[in-house]
Image: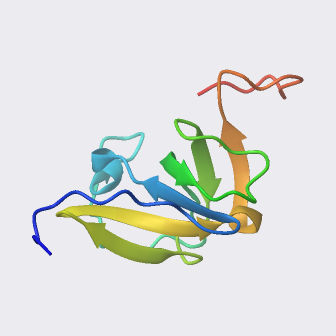
Amino acid sequence: MDPDAKLAIQMLADRVLVQLPTSEGERRSRSGILIPATAEMAKRLAWAEVMAVGPNVRMIKPGDRVLFNPEDRFEVEVKGDDYLILRERDIHAVAAERMDGSTGLYL
């Protein structure tokens, strides 16, 4: 098989494939202090964009943004790009344009 051939990826069960924004590395505090990506943050949740979902995922669609604990993940590299695999039950919140009855919070 040609190693450069493109293969379709289908997620299984309740798995969600997400990609962290490239800005998730270094960040700045409100006062302007640069915080390196390697700095430990106690139980800080992260946002990521959903790329694909398995057939048993009920509330999440590709293109949504999801909030999750970075400790509850599996990392995978596909064609040089880094992705994370999460379980739907490990996702704490979903941000999407299609949501009805929202809490009034907007990203």
User: Is residue 71 found left or right of 54 in the rendered image?
Assistant: left
- Residue 81 visible? The answer is yes
User: Is residue 72 found left or right of 85 in the rendered image?
Assistant: right
Query: Outermost residue toward the front?
Result: 1
Would you place residue 21 above or below residue 74 in this image? above
Q: Tell me the quarter of the image containing the C terminus.
A: top right
Q: Nearer the viewer, residue 57 or 75?
A: 57
Q: At x 69% / y 69%, what residue is drawn?
A: 13
Q: How many marks?
A: 0
User: Is residue 56 found left or right of 47 in the rendered image?
Assistant: right
Q: At x 40% / y 53%, what residue is drawn?
A: 19
Q: List x then y, in percent, for residue 102.
A: 83, 26
Q: List x then y, in percent, for residue 4.
A: 10, 63
User: Is residue 22 found left or right of 47 in the rendered image?
Assistant: left
The image quarter containing residue 76 is bottom left
Q: At x 15% / y 75%, what residue is drawn?
A: 1
Q: List x then y, in percent, for residue 81.
A: 23, 60
Q: At x 29% / y 60%, what residue is drawn?
A: 7
Q: Nearer the viewer, residue 31 or 98?
A: 98
Would you place residue 94 above or below residue 72 in this image? above
Would you place residue 70 above or below residue 62 in this image? below
State how the image is colored: rainbow
- Residue 33 visible? The answer is no
Q: Nearer the viewer, residue 6 or 63?
A: 6
